[in-house]
Image (cartoon, rainbow, N blue to C red):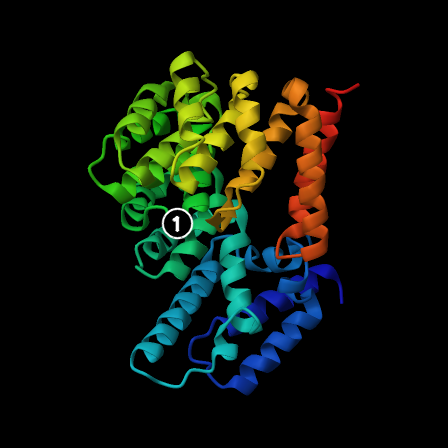
């Protein structure tokens, strides 16, 4: 079968897969097996290997098939949640990502790139669905959409106001960062939201600022005011965001050094993270960071991880503290190898990066 014929046949199969009137498990299984035979199982391959799927959904050129896929995915998700709420016995394996039908539908929406703009109205509706998973899929679609994602800006800010940093903070933030490269007025909107009385919107805005480069320098004044005057959670996020501003005046240096030994682990970790990004006052900061290598308090991430990342940034600037830093990093590396807890390989990579850069201080 020629490639164009495979793509056309695949488009037909996806069209059938998105037919919400087909509910028999046997028919769905037969469809997904044939799709997998033609294009491979999406969840076992890299994104670059999914070109046949994307070519198939783009074949009609006007987004008709994509809109049908979105409708089928949303319908499937809503039905699943409703059945759980009324106490029905749900075949979870039939719903979750292991099930090819459900995974193919959601993955097509997430990964069709700029083509998703043809279904912008449907994706905007997904953003206000009040279902975290549907929102997540829509955010990923917007992230790949490029400039057209600006049309969903009101819905993005509405979602930030609803979810704060509890759901999708990275994806929403990355969408806004991408848009700010094209539309400078995004920075103006973020600055306005830094004065919001809505805690969720404020927190999500602060997190977005932390993902930016030095374009966020114009937000320095409100960020440092927030870091000095707000509650612990808000202060912590402002401290994290300040690390992206590129500023390192005396006022900020003192703020970061003070908070690097705060009572709350997340404030300590974010202060150390920002110190590393800005490379503030090595003679004062490095001893604090080396001491923090013993600090494993936290969840999802801990202070030690932020200290390792900060030492990667300081590198040879550790100066006379290089011997102490190397000794502690070697001990951490040995413990990671011995315990092999989740994520240990990535952590060892960071440790090795820090060791490599610090050793240059001894040469």
Residue receiving disc 1? 120
Picture residue at 45% right of the left edge, 17% below the top: 247
x and y percentages locating residue 50 in the rendered image: 65, 57
Picture residue at 37% right of the left edge, 19% below the top: 218
Reply above or below: 262 against 33.
Answer: above
Picture residue at 57% right of the left edge, 24% below the top: 286
Examine the image and state in which quarter residue 312 appears: top right
Examine the image and state in which quarter residue 209 appears: top left
Residue 30 located left or right of residue 87: right
x and y percentages locating residue 126 in the rendered image: 36, 57
Q: For the image shown, how many numbered marks are present on the structure?
A: 1
Reply above or below: 337 against 356.
Answer: below
x and y percentages locating residue 175 in the rendered image: 44, 40
Within-10-Å neighbours for mark 1: few <14, some 14–19, many 20+: many
Please state, as top left, top right, bottom left or bottom right, where the N terminus lies in the image: bottom right
Please state, as top left, top right, bottom left or bottom right, where the C terminus lies in the image: top right
Most extreme residue toward the left, as rendered?
A: 197
Picture residue at 61% right of the left edge, 27% below the top: 313
Residue 294 located left or right of residue 41: left
Q: Is residue 228 visible?
A: yes
Q: Nearer the viewer, residue 156 or 4?
A: 156
Q: Is residue 188 visible?
A: no
Residue 58 located left or right of residue 39: left
| Label 1 secondary element | helix
Reply above or below: 72 against 352.
Answer: below
x and y percentages locating residue 106 in the rendered image: 49, 62
Reply above or below: 106 against 185.
Answer: below
């Amino acid at each position: 079968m020629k490639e164009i014929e495979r793509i056309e046949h695949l488009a037909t199969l996806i069209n059938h897969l998105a037919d919400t009137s087909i509910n028999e498990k046997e028919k769905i299984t037969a469809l997904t097996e044939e799709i997998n035979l033609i294009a491979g199982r999406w969840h076992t391959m890299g994104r670059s290997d999914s070109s046949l799927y994307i070519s198939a959904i783009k074949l009609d050129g006007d987004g008709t098939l994509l809109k049908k896929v979105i409708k089928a995915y949303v319908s499937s998700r809503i039905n699943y949640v409703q059945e759980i709420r009324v106490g029905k016995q749900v075949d979870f394996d039939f719903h979750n990502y292991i099930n090819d039908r459900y995974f193919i539908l959601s993955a097509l929406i997430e990964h069709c790139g700029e083509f998703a703009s043809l279904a912008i109205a449907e994706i905007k509706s997904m953003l206000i669905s009040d279902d975290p998973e549907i929102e997540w899929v829509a955010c990923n679609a917007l992230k790949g959409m490029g400039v057209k994602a600006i049309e969903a800006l009101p819905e993005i800010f509405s979602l930030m106001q609803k979810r704060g940093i509890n759901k999708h903070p990275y994806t929403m933030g990355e969408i806004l960062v991408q848009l700010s490269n094209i539309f400078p007025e995004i920075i103006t909107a973020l600055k306005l939201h830094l004065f919001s009385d809505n805690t969720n919107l404020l927190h999500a805005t602060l997190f977005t600022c932390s993902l930016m480069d030095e374009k966020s320098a114009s937000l320095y004044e409100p960020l440092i005011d927030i870091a000095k005057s707000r509650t612990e959670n808000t202060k912590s996020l402002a401290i994290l965001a300040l690390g992206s501003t590129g500023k390192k005046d005396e006022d900020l240096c003192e703020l970061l050094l003070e908070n690097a030994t705060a009572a709350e682990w997340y404030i300590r970790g974010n202060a150390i993270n920002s110190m590393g990004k800005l490379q503030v006052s090595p003679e004062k900061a490095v001893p604090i960071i080396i001491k923090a290598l013993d600090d494993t308090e936290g969840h999802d991430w801990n202070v030690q991880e932020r200290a390792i990342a900060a030492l990667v940034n300081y590198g040879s600037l550790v100066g006379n503290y290089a011997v102490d830093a190397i000794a502690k990093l070697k001990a951490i590396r040995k413990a990671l190898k011995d315990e092999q807890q989740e994520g240990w390989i990535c952590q060892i990579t960071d440790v090795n990066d820090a060791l490599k850069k610090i050793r240059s201080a001894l040469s």
